[in-house]
Image (spheres, grey):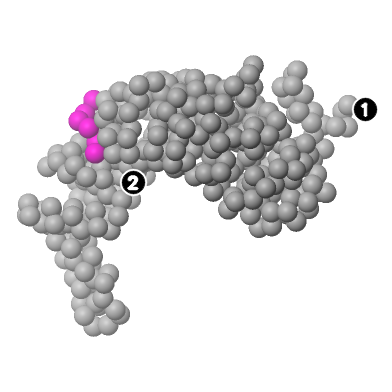
Amino acid sequence: MAASAFEAPLETAADWVVLADWLAERGDPRGAWLQLEQHTATLDEGPARARLEARLVGEFAPIGAARIDALTRELGKGTRAWIDWDWRCGLLTRVRISPGLDVLASLIVKTLTTLLDSSAALALADLHLGDVAPAIARKALLAGPPRPSLSRLTFGNFREPVGKLAPLAAKLPNLRELELRGPGIDLADTRLPALHTLRLHGEEALDEAILELGRGAFTKLRALDLRLGGRRYASSPAPEALLAGLLAGAATPELRHLGLSAVEFADPMVQWIADSALLPRLSTLDLSDSWLTNQGAETLLARADRFEHLEQIELSACHVDEDHELALVERFGERVTLGLQVHGMRWDPETRAFIREADDD
């Protein structure tokens, strides 16, 4: 049975009922297993439920163990050391591939394609390839048929260019959540009509991706997180213009969560957000781990009426002093999260490094 034979993603309990029936109609014991599991979950504690639970363990659990053993043998000796997975009724639901630097690229590709093409991957929803070089992961994903069951993907190892997303998107028609990590993220011509959550960790190279988002690359997004820097903070010659399309709001009409973290220009950015057409539609805003100082805090307080509707404002790991922390809590209450603030440091835009205030003396 090919992993692409069942075309629907599995996001709700109802989806799993459909899959159980689909498998049972084809004589696959995993269908009966899922049906029994689903029925057992509806029963109250008692003798009837205990009998069915015993059947799940005695009759069906050995089927699952046999499936795991068979796939382990097919993948080859040693590969299990760098594969972490979750199963349900003989079906993979989550896989993380974490090969060491000494593992040959050809073996990673072979292992991943074998796994994805197996019957066990029929219901695979969550694939984490963040520890695999993007070029290797791309080759494996493009080698096979479309993967309609995949709804969550983590791609990119922070060190190498992510590259063009469009060819991968064509293989992942039902992708709902996507995290891309690394430089060189190219969103041009990408079509992911079901995508509702996008996280980009660009390591200071997100300008083109942000502009593409502002042009309407993903109109169904409900949550967007942009980390604009890693150990160093992103800087653009014209950051307000860079974010203008996104903050205008027309490109993301369903967006409710916006994260703009690790931002060097966080203080003026608070003003841009306050003036934006996007803000009234948001329910949560994350500005954590940014160079947001008392100046940004004062803007939040002065424009509090614009932020009043937010259910959560995340400001952890910023640079607000205690007096402004107290003022923010007094104004926004439990809706603001401050966590630990960084004190005694300032950001030097020339060297683009943190400097202890004592070093300025």
Q: In the rendered view, would you say 63 is above or below 239?
A: below
Q: What residue would you read off at disc 2?
A: 94
Q: Residue at x 67, y 28 (%)?
A: 264
Q: Nearer the viewer, residue 212 or 272?
A: 272
**Among the two numbered marks 1 and 2 on one chain, the one whose residue lies closer to the N terminus:** 2
Q: Nearer the viewer, residue 121 or 334?
A: 334
Give the residues in magenta: 143-148
Residue 266 position within the rendered picture, expressed as x and y whole percent measured from the top left: 68, 33
Q: Residue at x 18, y 63 (%)?
A: 35
Q: What residue would you read off at disc 1?
A: 361
Mark 1–mark 2 distance (CA, rounded to whole Å)? 54 Å
**For the residue carrying disc 1, how many other residues have a C-alpha within 10 Å: few (<14), some (14-19), or many (20+)?**
few
Under mark 1, the amino acid is Asp
Q: Quadrant of residue 89?
A: bottom left
Under mark 2, the amino acid is Arg
Q: Residue at x 74, y 50 (%)?
A: 328
SS for callout 1: loop
